[in-house]
Amino acid sequence: MKQHSSNNPTHIHKPASAILILAGLLLAALQVAAQGVKETEVGRFAIGRTAGAKETEVGRFSVVNTAVPALSIAPDARGGSMGDNGVANGSDIASQYWNPAKYAFNYSKAGVGLSYTPWLRRLVNDIALAYLSGFYKIGNNDNQAFGASLRYFTLGEIPQQNSDSDVPFNWLNPYEMALDLSYSRKLSEMYSMAVAFRYIRSDMSDQSDEMTPGNSFAADVAGYVEKYIVLGSSESLCTFGYNISNIGTKVSYDGGATNQFIPTTLRLGTGLLYPLDEYNHVGVYLDLSKFLVPSVPILMGSTQEDMDEYDRRREEYNNMSFMTGIFRSFNDGLSNEVRKINLSLGGEYSYNDQFFLRGGYYYENPNHGNRQFFSFGAGFRMSVLQLDAAFLVSTVPNNPLDQTLRVSLSFDMDGIKNLFR
């Protein structure tokens, strides 16, 4: 991402600051897209509050920020078109992100898909997320599957300049990526479980000693239920799913001096797929999600005692293990924890399992991020491939995520195999 020259050397001539500001824009777009957030307030998030908040005159704007925020971006068009919904909406090729336990219920033997999302297009033109995922079922009982995905998030190009020149002598390419593998298995006709293991790398370095790439190893634990029930004269499919994702080690960008949590997340979802007739089906799905990351300590006063207590709590937070952090994420009081729960409601209409229309709504409390938007999408499936698209419409003014577009292309490997028979 090219930047214009400025007389302020702290923003142009120090690449580490530029990268932090760019990462802060990403963080702000993900979790601080609140109405009326001033440029100086976004700057606070850009330059260092790793998991924290901003105090106001009327209360605390408490947003859980993490390292590697790109892990929280919905990668596929189907889930994105239903309000970032996917824990219990039936198995698809992108289930590796939402709930890998769904793979065990997929009717196909194998599949692979590619998704692409231009990110923050209202601000810049070279930030994007690419997501490659797939699965393969094993065993003679059709009850086990391996899944895998590769996520690559590029933050574009950043010029590296000397203080006495506006001409870049080097270009930096910060990125975040994750590579994971999952195994899912049906434990009964209605219930499956899955585990996934993930390697995460976040390279925001500027080829100096100021910043170093961050690495983490994480795991997911997921489950999924499908049960047919009779509603009226029709047999409907009732679903339930859960996924605790990114349970893993903290990330450091400065050689271990400070450590940041990755976005460990709990997702719960349920849904109902109802047949209108032989060809027309309607599905309605509800997801609830919450970060399992503790809030960063905040300086609440100006006395020396307040500052000493703040320093003590900051050190404790920095040295806290990721498992302790999961339990501490529930320590902000019941009412505040309820407000941290994000809601996603989505629906999908299908005709003959070939044409799809989708819509959804996502809600996040104004004091904890204020991401609120509608999303819409459509899809078309043939015997071999499926093409999906999604479009986001923010209900919050000045949201840089507004008009985000996602496109997904997936292939049924059984269909491809049958073409050559």
Image: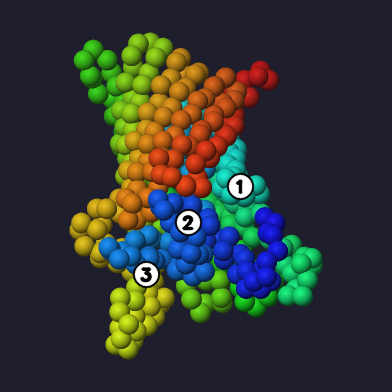
Quadrant of the rendering where the N terminus is positioned: bottom right
Residue located beneath label 3 in the image: 296
Label 1: few (<14), some (14–19) or many (≥20) C-alpha neighbours in 10 Å: some
**Which structural element holds mark 3?**
loop
Q: Which tag is nearer the camera, tag 2 or tag 1?
A: 2
**Which structural element holds mark 2?**
helix
Label 3: few (<14), some (14–19) or many (≥20) C-alpha neighbours in 10 Å: some
Q: CA distance from mark 2 to mark 1?
A: 16 Å
Q: What is the three-letter code of the residue carrying label 1? A: Ala
Residue located beneath label 2 in the image: 28
Q: Give the residue displayed 52% in from the left and 77% down from the top.
A: 256
Q: Specify which label sits upstream in the sequence, 3 or 2.
A: 2
* Residue 261: percent from left, percent from top: 44, 65
Looking at the rendering, which quadrant does residue 21 occupy?
bottom right
Tell me how the rendering is colored. rainbow
Q: Looking at the image, which is closer to me, 367 or 182?
A: 367
* 236 on left or right of 164: left
- In the rendered image, is residue 241 in sight? no
- In the rendered image, is residue 328 in sight? yes
* 16 on left or right of 60: right
* Residue 287: percent from left, percent from top: 33, 41
Q: What is the three-letter code of the residue carrying label 3? A: Val
Residue located beneath label 1 in the image: 128
